[in-house]
Image (spheres, rainbow, N blue to C red):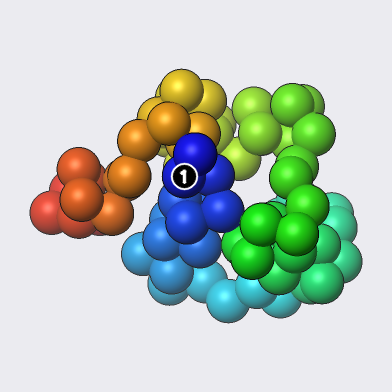
């Protein structure tokens, strides 16, 4: 599963830090950190919001290594 890696990758490719992303999704910065380290997973509702925000599918967010597939597009 690539969820935590993809959240970190998409955030960085968008030029955001964890504080900025936490403001967008109305969560604490520590929540973003815990998603990116795999300590916690976002709820399915939050996964939908993350996928929509970064214009990827939930399947891509969870199952694909986006850093290898989309690195040229972002």
Give the residue displayed 71% in from the left and 69% down from the top.
Answer: 33
Q: Position of residue 18 (x, y in %)?
A: 65, 73
x 82%, y 71%: residue? 30
Q: Which residue lies at the image location 71% right of the left edge and 75% below the top edge?
A: 19
Rate crowding at label 1 as few (under 14), some (14 to 19) or many (20 or more) other CA atoms within 10 Å: some
Query: In the picture, residue 39 is in which quadrant?
Result: bottom right
Q: Is residue 49 above or below residue 36?
A: above
Location of residue 13 (image quadrant): bottom left
Secondary element type, mark 1: loop
Residue 7, placed above or below residue 20:
above
| Image point (46%, 44%), residue name | 2
Q: Nearer the viewer, residue 53 or 59?
A: 59
The mark tally for this picture is 1
Left/right placement of residue 11 relative to residue 20 reads left
Q: Give above or below for 33 relative to 44.
A: below
Tell me where residue 43 appears, x and y as whole percent.
80, 34
Q: Position of residue 51 (x, y in %)?
A: 54, 34
Inspect this view and state whether residue 23 appears.
no
Q: Which part of the image, by quadrant, shows the C terminus?
A: bottom left
Could one spot residue 71 in this view of the protein? yes
Q: Position of residue 60 (x, y in %)?
A: 40, 30
Q: Is residue 37 above or below residue 46?
A: below
Q: Quadrant of residue 47?
A: top right
Residue under pointer 1 = 2
Return the residue nearer the eye: 41 or 72.
41
């Amino acid at each position: 599963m690539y969820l935590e890696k993809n959240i970190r990758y998409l955030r960085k490719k968008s030029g955001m830090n964890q504080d900025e992303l936490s403001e967008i999704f109305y969560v604490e910065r520590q929540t973003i950190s815990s998603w990116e380290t795999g300590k916690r997973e976002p709820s399915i509702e939050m996964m939908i919001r993350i996928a929509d925000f970064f214009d990827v599918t939930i399947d891509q967010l969870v199952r694909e290594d986006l850093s290898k597939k989309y690195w040229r597009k972002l």
